[in-house]
Amino acid sequence: MLRGGGNRAGEREERRARTSSRGRRLARWLPAVLIAGGVAFDVGTPPQYTAAPFFSAAPLVAAPLYSLAGTAVTVAVALVGEFLIAMYHSTQDNTQSVTEALTVLVVAFLALAINRVVRRSDARLASVRDVAEAAQRALLPTPPDRIGGFAVAARYVAAQADARIGGDLYAVQETPHGVRLIVGDVRGKGLEAVEAAVIVIGAFREAAEQEATLEAVAGRLERALQREGGRRAGLDQFEGFTTAVLVEIPSGTRSVLRLLNRGHPAPLLLSPDGGLCELPPASPALPLGMSDVAGWPDRVDETFFPAGSLLLLFTDGVTEARDRTGCFYDAPDRLRGRHFPGPDALLDTLAADVARHTGGAQADDMALLAVQRPLGE
């Protein structure tokens, strides 16, 4: 019904980018418009009226938009314009002309100083973005399009445009025991959450290769979080628990899903005919890292994975997304009945639909992971 939804989402993003680019180009003409408007205003009005506000505003507008050289040129043109206007009126009492020229000169120097501050801030911000993007690529690398014969797609959607990484996490890899996946969400925000995400992903990568069962993998993750928490001065300094869902598609069979859920939103299974079912755990469990609160044996749930079906895993940035009236986003209701050609289209549509639901005011990051079993198996 909404086949190709991912393409439409991409088209919307492209339109927004074009609109923003046009706006920036128009803004860059403002200093010239102000100077020309100042000249026209002064020539067309009696001598007692002054165009100094126009000539003063032009460098201030140029400061955040232009380079230092561009701002300096704007300053020079504004000063020359003010001087020529004074010569044009050529009154015997030059007090007003000198005062206006000094006003423009002072504002011009302020504009040059502002330009320097803005350029340095932009450089620092660009450096921080580069570091954050490199960290995200290292922590959450984009998975191959196919792993173990399954089509795979992943997304990290930051709530803030300039934020590139947080406590949401995902990983997928082919192991001797089958294809294994994790999607998780570390409690809290900031660098502590990122540190915990690094620990969880590192422990998962190792345990997924070595452990024969998902229960054993979860046990390794539990011990890794507890061990790291013991090195800190309490849970207030370390984000001590993580909701997560572990998934295994066992070797030798492609029609079985094994899931172990530790307090995480239930995955969704979307069939090729538009059907959808939620996969909640049979026995609810506490998140990883809370074994000191309660202990229990992990239980793996097993379900059928039909050919052509899509398994969707996500963090609570999806389920806790609200619209302007406070209504939560209902992923099963919004996705049921839709048809998606592959995991990329599913994730593109989901991300765009959440953004539309929240009006662009997303409150939390989202980690999304989708896996599709090929048709004809």
Image (cartoon, grey):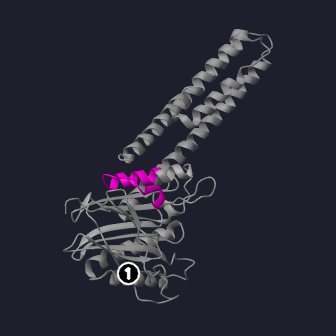
Residue at 81% from the left image edge and 14% from the top image edge: 93
Residue at 51% from the left image edge and 63% from the top image edge: 319
In the image, residue 350 lies in the stretch drawn in magenta? yes
In the picture, measured across the screen, residue 285 lies left or right of residue 93, that is: left
Helix, strand or loop under label 1 = helix
Residue at 47% from the left image edge and 67% from the top image edge: 167
Residue 161 shows in this picture: no
Q: Quadrant of the C terminus?
A: bottom left
Q: Nearer the viewer, residue 215 or 60?
A: 215
How many residues crowd around disc 1 within 10 Å: few (fewer than 14), some, or many (20 or more)?
many
In the picture, measured across the screen, residue 108 lies left or right of residue 342, that is: right
In the image, residue 50 lies in the stretch drawn in magenta? no
In the picture, measured across the screen, residue 237 lies left or right of residue 214, that is: right
Task: Kindly report the secondary structure that dominates the magenta region of the rendered protein.
Answer: helix
Residue 50 pos. (x, y %): 75, 19
Residue 88 pos. (x, y %): 69, 9
Q: Residue 182 is drawn in which quadrant?
A: bottom left
Residue at 50% from the left image edge and 36% from the top image edge: 20
Q: Which residues are magenta?
A: 332-352
Find disc 1 in the rendering and name its residue. 218
